Amino acid sequence: MADPLLTQAAETEACIALEPPPAQPPFPDPPQKPFGKLYAIADIHLSYKPNREALERLEPRPDDGLILLGDVGETAEHLRLGFSKATECFKKVYWCPGNHELYTIPTHKDVEGANLRGEEKYMFCVEVAREYGIITPEDPYDFWWVEGEDGSAIPHVICPIFTLYDYTFRPPEIKPEDAVAWAREKDIEATDEFMLHPDPYESRQAWCDVLVSKTTSKLTLALAKYGRDVKFIIAGHWPLRQDLVDLRAIPRFSPWCGTVRTEDWHLRFNCEVVVSGHIHVRRTDWRDNIRFEECSLGYPKQWNHCRDEGLDINDMMREILPGQDHGNIDRSQTVWRRYGYPDSQRH
């Protein structure tokens, strides 16, 4: 029997171009002005002591929101540490998983949730997030409001997603089923191959296929409900597009970085901003005049230079909404953010 959600989504998507958007979308009432800002950060990796110490310096922003874009850590303890601090400092918090949350680590046998694998480990993490009132990919999409130039309240649909990867981020001459062997030729192999299990699915590709189909359905239904006058913010750990995976030191790591099935989602689902992590290369890009933000903190050695400059985790968070004014910047070029702020501002 066909999944009724997928069937409904397919029928809805076919009709979107034929039907006008709803005249009065069913939005909740906006909060009182002034509206807060929405920030994001990824890959805070709390298994590392310097990153845990950095988290303790997170400053309260009681009117603002925060998106945690995965790789908070590997254990329930890491998650609770990150979630408790985030919800202590921010009015609203969103989370989506990265690969590290999904790890099953043999040496952690006595740790809460340590024996869970695949989908069960993911759902365990979802339940931990919900203990703190955090919005996950399994929850209804939420709203964030921005004040327009005329003083109006402009809603944005906030969409935390979980899509995984299917080894299709690779050169066109390499088949997806050969991508891992291609990476191994240069001694590159993700830890995921040993610790990220796809249970109950037969492979990570099969799990990714289910996740992408499920997320497509959810986004399609939301777009039909709210119409194209409302902008979406898609926030997930893995990049949506292969052309934003620029790993010059380890280019053959790309198979573990996403799926080509999400390549057009920024247009298909009416995005204003797409937010991700995973790559540990902080940058801002535009595709089709839509902003893409890579918001990783990374392992301690990857941001030691920032601490040497007196910067901390507060400086590394990225403003998503309303967003920084990039002025007349050439949007065909990447804005590199080695220090969190644009490199062009470094003196």
Image: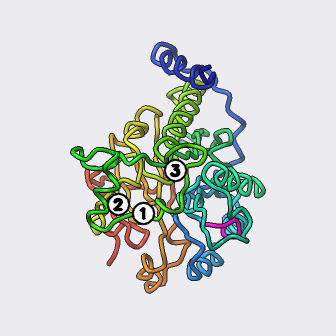
Front residue of 69 and 126: 126
Residue labelled with disc 1: 190
Residue 291: horizontal and vertical position, in percent? 40, 48
**Amino acid at the residue labelled 1:** Ala
Q: State which region is magenta.
A: 73-78
Tell me, yes or no, whether the highlighted magenta stretch contains residue 330: no
Does residue 131 appear left or right of residue 212 in this picture? right
**Amino acid at the residue labelled 3:** Gly
Residue labelled with disc 3: 236
Note whether 253 is above or below 225 in the view shown: below
Tell me, yes or no, whether the highlighted magenta stretch contains residue 74: yes
Using a 10 Å C-alpha cutoff, classify the residue at mark 1 as few (fewer than 14 neighbours), some (14 to 19) or many (20 or more).
Answer: some
Mark 3 to mark 2 CA distance (whole Å): 18 Å
Please identify, in this view, whether the residue under mark 3 or under mark 1 is nearer the observer: 1
Residue 214: horizontal and vertical position, in percent? 56, 34
- What secondary structure is found at the residue carrying circle 2? helix
Does residue 270 appear left or right of residue 40 in this picture? left
Residue labelled with disc 2: 253
Q: Quadrant of residue 142?
A: top right
Using a 10 Å C-alpha cutoff, classify the residue at mark 2 as few (fewer than 14 neighbours), some (14 to 19) or many (20 or more).
Answer: many
Residue 136: horizontal and vertical position, in percent? 65, 48
